[in-house]
């Protein structure tokens, strides 16, 4: 069982808050018939219309076959369409249907209410500060991923 100090460790807090937020948001969108993978696909296609299945798989960090199965199910449900890429006949571009855009709009409203509820204890300045700090941490982590593994693990001041 984690000690009280473990629960205040920032790595634990970030992971726990992210997990709790995903679970709570899942419950809220379940009433409109969405699974987490479906709402992720809707969100990505809404923000990046016309991406390929391979690009979608990369964004979702899943295998191309997994993305293909999700796309197949959502296409059968009438939420997306595949359109041939005019420059490359081997590639299909993915687009949301009008129905899916309506679902995306409803999901967006649910997300706004959810974030307002989740951040209710923070003042506007605190929300802005939290956002800024998380953006800086994200940029740092992304930059760390761009380094060679040996370089990223090397401690400051350690001999090369």
Image (cartoon, rainbow, N blue to C red):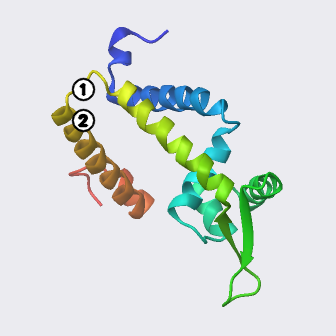
Q: Residue 118 appears in which quarter of the rendering?
A: top left
Q: Nearer the viewer, residue 114 or 105?
A: 105
How far, Cα to Cα, is label 2 from label 1?
6 Å
Judge from the rendering whether residue 109 lies leftward or rightward of residue 38; answer left or right.
left
Q: Position of residue 63 (x, y in %)?
A: 71, 57
Residue that mark 1 sits on: 122
For mark 2, give the secondary structure. helix
User: Can residue 3 be seen?
Assistant: yes
Q: Position of residue 88 (x, y in %)?
A: 70, 88
Judge from the rendering whether residue 81 lies leftward or rightward of residue 8; answer left or right.
right
Above or below, 110 relative to 71:
above
Q: Position of residue 152 (x, y in %)?
A: 37, 55
User: Which residue is rendered at x = 42% and y = 38% of the image?
Assistant: 112
Judge from the rendering whether residue 155 lies leftward or rightward of residue 71; answer left or right.
left
Judge from the rendering whether residue 134 lies leftward or rightward of residue 99; answer left or right.
left
Question: Callout 2: few (<14), some (14-19), or many (20+) C-alpha neighbours within 10 Å?
Answer: some
User: Can residue 61 be seen?
Assistant: no
User: Which residue is rendered at x = 21% and y = 41% of the image?
Assistant: 128
Residue that mark 2 sits on: 127
For mark 1, give the secondary structure. loop
Q: Nearer the viewer, residue 131 or 64?
A: 131
Q: Quick one: quadrant of the C terminus? A: bottom left
User: Which residue is rendered at x = 35% and y = 9% of the image?
Assistant: 4
Question: Callout 1: few (<14), some (14-19), or many (20+) C-alpha neighbours within 10 Å?
Answer: few
Above or below, 81 relative to 159:
below
Please identify the residue farthest to the left as the structure is shown. Answer: 125
Q: Residue 76 appears in which quarter of the rendering?
A: bottom right
Please identify the residue farthest to the right as the structure is shown. Answer: 76
Q: Nearer the viewer, residue 96 or 61?
A: 96
Answer whether labels 2 and 1 touch (C-beta < 8 Å): yes
* Numbered marks: total: 2
Please report whichever mark, 2 or 1, sits nearer to the chain's N-terminal start. Answer: 1
């Amino acid at each position: 069982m984690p000690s009280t100090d473990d629960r205040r460790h920032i790595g634990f807090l970030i992971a726990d808050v992210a997990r709790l937020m995903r679970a709570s948001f899942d419950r809220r969108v379940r009433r409109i018939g969405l699974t987490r993978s479906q709402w992720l696909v809707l969100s990505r296609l809404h923000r990046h219309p016309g991406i390929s299945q391979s690009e979608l798989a990369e964004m979702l960090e899943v295998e191309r076959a997994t993305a293909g199965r999700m796309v197949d199910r959502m296409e059968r449900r009438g939420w997306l369409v595949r359109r041939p890429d005019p420059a490359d006949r081997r590639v299909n571009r993915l687009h949301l249907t009008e129905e899916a855009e309506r679902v995306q709009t409803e999901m967006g409203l649910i997300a706004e209410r959810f974030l307002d509820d989740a951040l209710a204890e923070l003042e506007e300045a605190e929300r802005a500060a939290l956002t800024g700090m998380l953006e800086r941490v994200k940029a740092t982590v992304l930059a760390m991923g761009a380094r060679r593994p040996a370089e990223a693990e090397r401690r400051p001041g350690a001999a090369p």
